[in-house]
């Protein structure tokens, strides 16, 4: 991929909150149910993953974080396909439309990384440009520990790399309080309250439509909170040191 194309991706990502051009798909009219209908299924070693696979050309994998899903990239997918890319956007296990199996260690970063590799192996994709946001960074580092050669270019969006500077909004201990907090995300009434607080603090300008909010709310109301529970009670309390891994990478990287 040329420098020009990398910066084209950069611009599209930077404009994710901006108004689409007249000839672009208006994401606010794209109902979450329709988005789900466009997803494909992959049976990983731990459960079924749902994912978008659109376009032809060089491959871009768009990886979400917590507590989102591939819905995060809904405004970008068709734009990138129009630019000539094949876009893969998975819902990680326990998020979005993917399965939510019982247990918690299934949702550690190492297993998330393993399942991405399983998906890409099933799609016969040898290498790709990797876009990662938020906790997706941790899953990416674990993927790279398993197989460095698969990612040929890396785009990091507001993600997690080092302990220094990492200040998550929530850190919990395992147990009753953490599980009660997850119930509050899934019971419907407090789901709305918590999401409103999230959007208020996380967005400079909240212009999300009801259809768009539904894509964030519905998975939570379906009880997709086990992955969140593991992240907030375990992963972000004991962040590994990835310094050696990061220094060893020999691929182009854009940090946004």
Image (cartoon, rainbow, N blue to C red):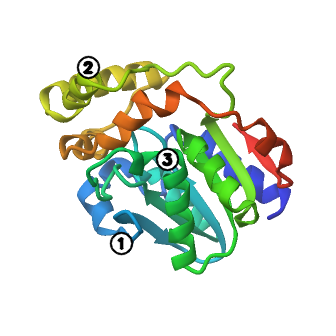
Measured Cα–Cα span from mark 2 to mark 1: 34 Å
* Sequence-wise first label, 3 or 2: 3
Please determine whether, in this image, residue 230 is positioned above or below residue 31.
above
The residue that label 2 is drawn on is 177
* Sequence-wise first label, 1 or 3: 1
The residue that label 1 is drawn on is 41
Residue 39 in the figure: left or right of residue 31: right
Closest to the observer, 207 or 38: 38
Residue drawn at (49%, 54%) of the image: 111
The residue that label 3 is drawn on is 64
The N terminus: image quadrant: bottom right
Residue 107 in the figure: left or right of residue 142: left
Measured Cα–Cα span from mark 1 to mark 3: 17 Å
Residue 33 in the figure: left or right of residue 133: left
Residue 237 in sight from this viewpoint: yes
Residue drawn at (44%, 66%) of the image: 52
Mark 2: few/some/many CA within 10 Å (<14, 14-19, 20+):
few
Measured Cα–Cα span from mark 3 to mark 2: 26 Å
Q: List the single residue furthest toward the bottom.
A: 124
């Amino acid at each position: 991929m040329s420098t020009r194309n990398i910066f084209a991706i950069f611009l599209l990502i930077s404009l994710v909150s901006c108004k689409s051009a007249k000839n672009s798909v208006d994401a606010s009219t794209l109902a979450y149910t329709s988005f789900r209908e466009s997803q494909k299924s992959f049976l990983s070693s731990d459960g079924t993953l749902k994912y978008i696979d659109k376009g032809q050309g060089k491959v871009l994998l768009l990886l979400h974080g917590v507590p989102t899903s591939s819905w995060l990239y809904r405004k970008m997918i068709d734009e990138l396909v129009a630019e000539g890319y094949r876009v893969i956007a998975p819902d990680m296990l326990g998020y979005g439309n993917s399965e939510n199996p019982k247990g918690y260690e299934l949702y550690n970063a190492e297993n998330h990384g393993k399942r991405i590799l399983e998906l890409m192996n099933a799609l016969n994709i040898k290498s790709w440009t990797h876009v990662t946001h938020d906790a997706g960074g941790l899953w990416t580092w674990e993927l790279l520990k398993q197989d460095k050669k698969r990612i040929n270019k890396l785009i990091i969006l507001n993600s997690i790399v080092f302990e220094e500077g990492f200040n998550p909004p929530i850190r919990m201990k395992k147990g009753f309080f953490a599980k009660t907090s997850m119930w509050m995300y899934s019971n419907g009434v407090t789901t709305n309250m918590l999401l409103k607080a999230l959007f208020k603090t996380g967005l400079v300008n909240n212009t999300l439509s009801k259809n768009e909010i539904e894509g964030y709310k519905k998975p939570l109301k379906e009880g997709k909170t086990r992955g969140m529970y593991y992240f907030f009670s375990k992963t972000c309390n004991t962040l590994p040191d990835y310094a050696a891994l990061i220094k060893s990478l020999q691929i182009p990287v854009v940090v946004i």
